[in-house]
Image: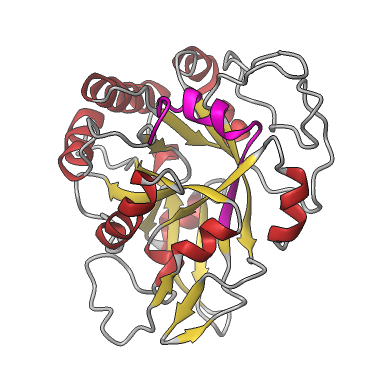
């Protein structure tokens, strides 16, 4: 799916608005993992001024993972580069934490680590916890015994070189809920903005059931869902041509009517393979037009966005 700025200019006159989310995978070569020697990897740089010119209004960057074992090697660069755009109200910045399923890393400990890296009291987008499959390495025997949540990792020749399993599937529902609740509570206590939960509605339901529906009530949802074709669903707000995916049960989606403010912080990651009309990435000194990037959608205009995300009347 292509993300074409000129097409969006018509659609975004009064909203919705679009944003990106980035991690080291967005700018470092595939296979360059945290805490490894990436000196021989081709590096890419994002030109945020070109992103702003194409109506990108917000960016979330991965900051931390677990209690530090998977922290993002590119976060400091993203955060520094985006500061001037955030202060000017051109591109608002926010940070997210990848919640680790490791039983030795509590939700509270992970929250403290996140807040030690990201100063959540500063004015920024609300902090986010990323809850999705947490792939951990396991033996072939374990993977073969649990095909419902394990898979083989293949190299470029199609050969299986490792086996990974979803760490969350190895925990009890009560243990997952505790980890999530403790992270959310700790970060909510340290931030002037309520945290947001990044997930997929179906994954949330399947992993957490009724307990998850109760947990999500106070929080906004950032949903990942990737349709094959451009969505043409309609929203309760008649001016919008796309509709949010179905939220997890008990999450509140404002019914509203045309022209009403949209006060919720829900938004939608609708594509992971977007390409900008004007390339924003330069890799090893060369513009890279085929660079893929995640794009997100907020179903209203900038004034509603700033109100919903606690940005107030000025950046």
Is the residue 116 above or below the residue 266 in the image?
below
Q: In this view of the protein, which residue sits in the foreground, 152 or 201?
A: 201
Find residue 97 and report its horizontal and vertical position in percent: 33, 42
Q: Quadrant of residue 23?
A: bottom left
The stretch drawn in magenta includes residue 297: yes
Find residue 305 and report its horizontal and vertical position in percent: 53, 30
Image point (44%, 74%), residue name = 30
Q: Is residue 68 left or right of residue 143?
A: left
Q: Quadrant of residue 104?
A: top left
Image point (60%, 23%), residue name = 248
Is the residue 291 above or below the residue 227 in the image?
below
The stretch drawn in magenta includes residue 104: no
Q: Quadrant of residue 15?
A: top right
Image point (69%, 16%), residue name = 260
Q: In this view of the protein, which residue sits in the foreground, 65 or 48?
A: 48
**Magenta stretch in the rendered image:** 294-315
Find residue 154 and report its horizontal and vertical position in percent: 52, 73
Q: Quadrant of the C terminus?
A: top left
Q: Is residue 105 left or right of residue 167?
A: left
Q: Quadrant of the N terminus?
A: bottom right
């Amino acid at each position: 799916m292509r993300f074409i700025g000129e097409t969006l200019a018509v659609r975004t006159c009064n909203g919705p608005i679009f944003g990106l989310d980035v991690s080291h995978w967005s700018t470092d070569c595939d296979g360059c993992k945290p805490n490894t020697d990436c000196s021989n990897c081709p590096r890419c740089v994002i030109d945020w001024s070109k992103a702003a010119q194409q109506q990108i209004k917000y960016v979330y960057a991965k900051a931390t993972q677990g209690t530090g074992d998977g922290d993002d090697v590119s976060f400091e660069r993203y955060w520094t580069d985006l500061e001037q755009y955030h202060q000017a109200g051109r591109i608002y910045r926010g940070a997210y934490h990848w919640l680790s399923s490791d039983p030795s890393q509590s939700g509270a400990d992970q929250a403290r680590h996140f807040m030690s890296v990201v100063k959540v009291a500063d004015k920024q987008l609300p902090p986010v916890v990323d809850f999705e499959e947490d792939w951990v390495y396991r033996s072939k025997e374990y993977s073969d015994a649990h095909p419902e949540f394990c898979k083989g990792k293949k190299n470029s020749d199609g050969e299986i070189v490792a086996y990974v399993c979803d760490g969350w599937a190895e925990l009890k529902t009560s243990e997952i809920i505790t980890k999530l609740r403790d992270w959310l509570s700790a970060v909510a206590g340290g931030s002037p903005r309520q945290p947001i939960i990044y997930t997929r509605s179906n994954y949330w339901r399947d992993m957490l059931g009724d307990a998850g529906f109760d947990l999500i009530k106070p929080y906004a949802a950032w949903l990942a869902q990737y349709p094959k074709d451009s969505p043409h669903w309609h929203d309760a707000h008649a001016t919008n041509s796309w509709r949010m995916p179905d939220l997890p049960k008990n999450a509140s989606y404002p019914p509203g009517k045309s022209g009403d403010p949209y006060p919720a912080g829900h938004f939608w990651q609708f594509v992971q393979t977007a390409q900008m009309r004007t390339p924003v990435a330069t890799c090893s000194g060369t513009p890279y037009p085929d660079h893929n990037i995640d794009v997100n959608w907020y179903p209203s205009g900038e004034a509603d966005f700033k109100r919903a995300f606690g940005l107030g009347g000025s950046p």
